[in-house]
Image (spheres, rainbow, N blue to C red):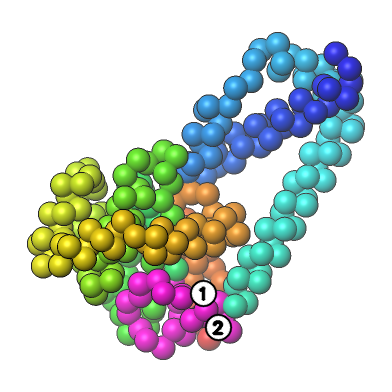
Amino acid sequence: MEISTAWQQYRQLRLWLLTTILAVGLTLGGCSKLGESAKTANVSPEFEQQVIQVIRNNPKAILESVQAYQQQQQENLQSSRQSFLEQMKTNPSAIIGSSPTTGASSQQIVLLEFSDFQCPFCARAHQTIKQFMDKHQGQVTLVYKHLPLSQIHSEALPAAKASWAAQQQGKFWQYQDALFTQQEKLGEDLYVQIATTLNLDLEQFNRDRQSAEAQASIQKDLELAQTLAISGTPFFVINGETFSGAVELSEMEEVLARVSSKN
């Protein structure tokens, strides 16, 4: 096999390896679409052996290439996140947009939650967030951002659209709570049942959740998550501090204390 061909195939394998490594890290405390990508990567034993031989013949070049790639990716991520965090401090309304909010109206301390209704870690974190917000309603502004990992959760996007439709009738938070509380029942019957229980206009509810506006709103959240390289759920940002996974209440209190001291 020619070295140029081997090198191209090596780069494909490198991407697969990096994806696998990232997936392992992200799935330790949350749901991740990267894990599915790594599982479905199609790398034959023969191809892998050929690439290993290229690596053995060019160890220094391989190492330098991987290091340069990782450094560039990290710099791009840091730049995107820094820009986002600065805007979050100076113009939180632009970050919040039309996303559902609850808590303090001052927006001095803003907690962004990127979540997936079918993610079990998100359901656990939801209970913690409820306790946290019950205590800090007058201090913290909670903002919900949709991050449905459709590659691994078939009901994540339909549930997100249903909650968006409930938001149009002023019942997002009640609907969101019901979805997480009854996560094991996610599906069409549950979406309609919750809407009925909350006395939503069912005709409008069904029209809204199937609308292009619902898809566009959720897509906007997905694009923000992509910009910040968020691939796992739940993920949180509070005034420049980031954390993820099924967070404990004590951890959230510590983060709040830190960001409060900076205000």
Q: Are marks 1 and 2 in contact (CB under 8 Å)?
A: yes
Instruction: Give the position of the N terminus as an image quadrant.
Output: top right
- Residue type at the position of mark 1: Ile
- Residue type at the position of mark 2: Asn
Q: What residue is shown at x 71% (from left), y 17% (from top)?
A: 48
Please say if 108 is above or below 132.
below
Disc 2 designates what residue?
Answer: 91
Please tell me the numbered disc located at residue 95: 1
Displayed quadrant of residue 143 = bottom left
Where residue 120 sits in the image (x, y, percent)?
A: 33, 46
Please say if 24 is above or below 214.
above
Q: What residue is shown at x 29% (from left), y 63% (from top)?
A: 208
Q: What stretch of residues is rendered in magenta?
A: 88-111
Please say if 124 is above or below 95.
above
Q: Assign a secondary structure to mark 2.
A: loop
Q: Is residue 152 visible?
A: yes
Please tell me the numbered disc located at residue 255: none
From the viewer's perspective, tell me whether residue 82 is left or right of residue 98. Answer: right
User: Any magenta on residue 76?
Assistant: no
From the viewer's perspective, tell me whether residue 39 is left or right of residue 72. Answer: left
Q: What residue is shown at x 77% (from left), y 50% (from top)?
A: 71
Q: Using the numbered discs, state the Cα–Cα distance from disc 1 to disc 2 in whole angstroms.
A: 7 Å
Displayed quadrant of residue 200 = bottom left
From the viewer's perspective, tell me whether residue 252 is left or right of residue 61. Answer: left
The one nearer the camera, 171 or 118, is 171
